[in-house]
Image (cartoon, rainbow, N blue to C red):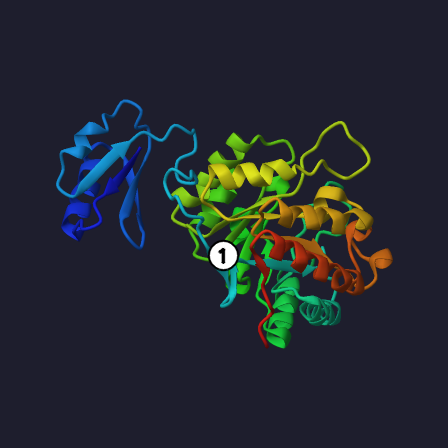
Amino acid sequence: MIIVMNPDATQDQIDNVIGMIREMGLKEHAIQGTELTVVAVIGEDRKKDPSIFETLPGVSKAMKVLAPYKMSARELHKQTSTVTIGEDCVIGGNALQVIAGPCSVESEEQIVNTARMVKEAGATALRGGAFKPRTNPFSFQGHGEDGLKMLAAAREATGLPIVTEVVAPADVELVSSYADCLQVGTRNAQNYALLSEVGKQPKPVLYKRGMSMTLDEYLQAADYILAAGNENVILCERGIRTFEKFGRNTYSIAAIAELKHRSHLPVVGDPSHATGHAHLVTPAARATIAVGADGMIIEVHHDPAHAWSDGAQSLTPKQMADMMPSLAQIADAVGRSLAIPQHA
C-alpha cells in the first residue's frame, strides 16, 4: 500500500499517518519529493483497508500496490530516482555514466594505470574486484582488503569513485569503509542476508540480476535492500542463463526497458558479462544505450590475454576509447548524453 499526502501536508499530518501504520503492526518508508510526500506501507498489508488512511488530515489518497514488489515499484515514485556514486557520478539523470575497469584487482600498478586509461577514454567511475566469488574454488578469489587499498590508491590518483563487490554479510562494513559503491553480484543476487546487510549501510548498491531470476523475483529482492533503509540502489541487467551457447549469457535488452517501466530505480547494463566475448561488447553497449539504460559497467584490461580473470570479455583501453564516440552519438539520438569525467 502507498499513501499519497497532499502537497501542503504538514509534518504533523505525516507523522500521524506513520503512527497509524505502526499501530497496525506495519512499518513505513516515507519518500519526500519536491512537490509531495508518499508513504509506503511495508509488511503484510493485504487485509488492511486503504480507505482508513483517506480519512486522515493531509492524505490525498491511499492505494494498494498491485506488484509483488513495493518499494522498487514505479507506482511509489513516478520519476526515476537518481543515485550518486562519489561526488559527481549521478546514475539516473540525463547524462549516462560509464563504469569501467578490470574484473580483478591484480596489483596497485595495474589498477592505478588502468584507472588513468579508462578515465582518459571517458569512464566516470572505476570498477574492480577485491573479493571475487568464483565458480571454481581453485580460481583466484581476489586480494581482499589489500585489493581495497589498491582501489583506494587508484581513486586517489584519478579522482574516480570506485565500485567493488562484496560477497559476504561479514565483509559489508569493511568494503563500505573503502568503496564508493558496493556491488552485489549475480551469484549473491538471492543472498537475502547480504542484501539486508548492504541495505543497512549508506553507500550506493549496484545490484546485479541473478542468472536465473525473473524480473518479479529481482525487484522483490531489491526491496530487501530498500526495506533495510538504503534508497540508493542501482539495478544492473547482465544477462541470464539460457540454452544458447554463442555467448556467456543471453543479454535481455528488453529487460532493461521493462525494468525502467516497472521500477523507479535507475538501471544500467553490463555488456561484458552479458556476452562474454570482447567482440560483442561494443554492439551490446550500443544497444544498452539505445534501449534506455542509465549507463553501463564494462570490463577493461590493459592485457586481456594475461588477465587473472575474465580476459575474454575485457576490452583494451584503446578498444574502449574507440567505442565511446559511437555511444555518444546514440545517446544524443535518444535525447541523452555521455557524462564527462571530472578532473582529479
Which residue, given by chain and number where applicable, does mark 1 sit on? 93
Residue 67 x %, y %: 42, 29
Name the foreground residue: 228 vs 289: 289
Q: Quadrant of residue 255?
A: top right
Question: Can residue 231 be spotted in the picture?
Answer: yes
Q: Residue at x 38, y 44 (%)?
A: 77
Q: Of the residues shown, which amino acid type is indicated by label 1? A: Gly
SS for dot 1: loop
Q: Quadrant of residue 343?
A: bottom right
Q: Residue at x 23, y 36 (%)?
A: 61
Extreme residue in the right direction = 305
Q: Residue at x 60, y 65 (%)?
A: 124
Q: Is residue 250 left or right of residue 267?
A: right
Name the image quarter holding the C terminus: bottom right
Q: Quadrant of residue 55?
A: top left
Name the foreground residue: 170 vs 261: 261
